[in-house]
Image (cartoon, helix red, strand yellow):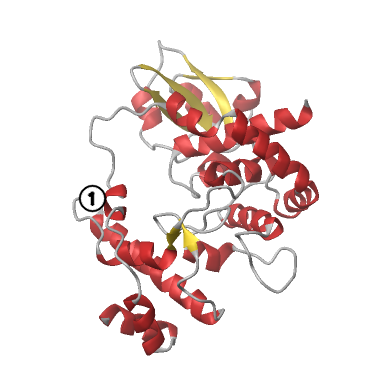
Amino acid sequence: MQFADEVAARRKLDPEWVRATIGSARMLTNVPRLMLPAPKGSPKNWAAYRARFIDPVRIAAGVRFWRSNADTLARAEKEFGVPAEIIVGIIGVETIYGRNMGSFRVIDALSTLSFDFPQAHPRAAERQAFFREELESFLSTESRTHQDPMQPLGSYAGAMGMPQFMPSSLAKYAVDYDGDGRIDLVSNTVDVIGSVANYFKAFGWTRGMPSTFPVGFDEARLQKATLLAPDIVPTFSADSFVAAGAVLDADAAGFKGLLALIELQNGGDAPTYVAGTQNFYVITRYNWSSYYAMSVLDLGREVKMAMEQ
């Protein structure tokens, strides 16, 4: 209730409404454990991760979505510079084009994670603060739009709609792309496409820039630890990348932007590597995982290829 009063004061909301709304939320006992990271020593497996998202069912759904929304996707690409296959990849990975948008009440999920976040998490304080900010944003939006805060459904983390926007992202980046006077990310694919494109533009998507390049290694000169040290943050020029033992094709060697060495582990097998650009890094701002970003790229590419057959 103290948090409710603070939110009401900060956002200039009716304190009784905020208290009643949070007071009506239910504790989701199974959600906190879903926030805990995998046990240490659990090997990552890019092939297994990819297989979760790149399959015939999702590709076929992507083709149907692209064909049904071709004009809007082309408009978004022209206006925001984000290729259709990136937008199609995001929506497909997130919810299979609206098929799986989550069944948790958002108010329950956000309240649970705001007040009962698992303290065993290595970044518990930071993550709990994040979910309190998301709860505050959700309450502000629901009050401003006069919506029933008990109605929206989403993921166990409180992400909503086809693109699974968190409340703060919805408030900052969602757009009324069809001009009907309201933003609908649940059933309006025009708003969904425009909002995803706007999100990427806001985080620095560069029109026409590749997301990745193939990369090999000259083992005699390889300084892999140096190349991996910045993680997925683009840090190296093409020349400095090569100087550290990377082998690039002609397109990558002539690239004027910065590169990062992306390592995707394959369990006990040899890792997969690509050179990531700033646009690859932008995809990870949607979900902070290189495995996620590669799945988005691969799904979009597979759907595009299926469209062309």
Residue 4 appears left or right of 139: left
Q: Nearer the viewer, residue 91 or 263?
A: 91
Q: Residue at x 50, y 28 (%)?
A: 51
Q: Is residue 47 above or below residue 9?
A: above
Q: Is residue 144 above or below residue 156?
A: below
Q: Nearer the viewer, residue 48 or 195?
A: 48
Q: Is residue 208 visible?
A: no
Q: Callout 1: few (<14), some (14-19), or many (20+) C-alpha neighbours within 10 Å? A: some
In the rendered view of the protein, which quadrant contains the C terminus?
top right
Element under disc 1: loop
Q: Which residue is drawn at 32% across and 78% down?
A: 23
The residue wearing badge 1 is 121
Count of numbered marks:
1
Q: Where is residue 21 in the image (x, y as percent from the top left)?
A: 39, 78
Q: Residue at x 77, y 42 (%)?
A: 67
Q: In this view, does 234 lie above or below 132?
A: above
Residue 151 appears left or right of 177: left
Q: Position of residue 79 (x, y in %)?
A: 75, 55
